[in-house]
Image: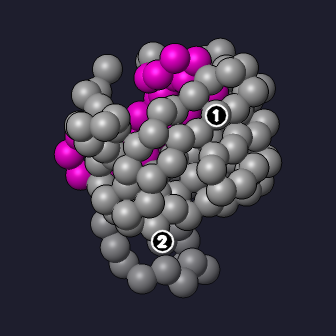
Amino acid sequence: MKTETLAICLIGAALSIIYPVIVADSQTNLDPAPTYQRIELNNLFKIAEHQDQIPWQPFHEGVDIHRLYGDGVHGPTAALMRFRRGGKVPLHHHDGYEHIVVLSGSQHDQNSRADEGTLIVNPPGSAHSVVSDGCIVLAIYEKPVAFGPDGEAIKPA
């Protein structure tokens, strides 16, 4: 069997929900498994070229978010985050791992500056704030993030 994909394009050429279509092909050596709906980000490091096609929501001052899955309050979450010049995510605490891939531009926190192409993995128990003069990142959180001095999880937009 061969899997071809029928992509439903949500954001130009940048973000698609993929609905697999199975095609018989005796040369494929895949084990039999059911197909499923998935999110596929194409040309990820060129996403800044298509950023105006993404349905961003306000997140913090100077920062917008587009959630790929999860609500940011319960369980894991993945999201694209766009920092405008001077954008800041205030001090927050991670109860689980946080993975950040800088797709365009750069950002920095108390530890370092991260430029395009950088992967950051913040461990459980870490806390930081993040500022940028403009960037887009892919953020993947194992557990909800706690913001502010009260440690309250931010509510979804």
Secondary element type, mark 1? strand
Visible residue check, residue 66 = yes
- On the image, the x and y values in percent for residue 128 come to 51, 48
Q: Which contiguous range is marked in magenta?
A: 59-83
| Magenta segment, prevailing SS (helix, strand or loop) | strand
Q: Name the residue beneath numbered marker 1.
A: 131
| Residue that mark 2 sits on | 1
Tell me the kind of residue under disc 2. Answer: Met
The amino acid pointed to by label 1 is Val
Q: Position of residue 110 (x, y in %)?
A: 63, 50
Q: Is residue 142 left or right of residue 15?
A: left
Q: Quadrant of residue 103?
A: top right
- Decide if residue 64 is on the left or right side of residue 77: right
Q: Residue at x 57, y 45 (%)?
A: 138
Instruction: Give yes or no for residue 114 being in the magenta stretch.
Output: no
How many C-alpha atoms fall within 10 Å of the one at disc 1: few (<14), some, or many (≥20)?
many
Residue 142's place in the image compared with 83, above or below, is below
Residue 79, given in percent of the width and then of the height, sits at 47, 39
Categorize mark 2 by other alpha carbons within 10 Å: few (<14), some (14-19), many (20+). Answer: some
Q: Residue at position x 51%, y 62% from top?
A: 122
Up the image or down, 123 lies above or below 32; here it is above
What is the residue that sits farthest to the left in this orientation?
Answer: 74
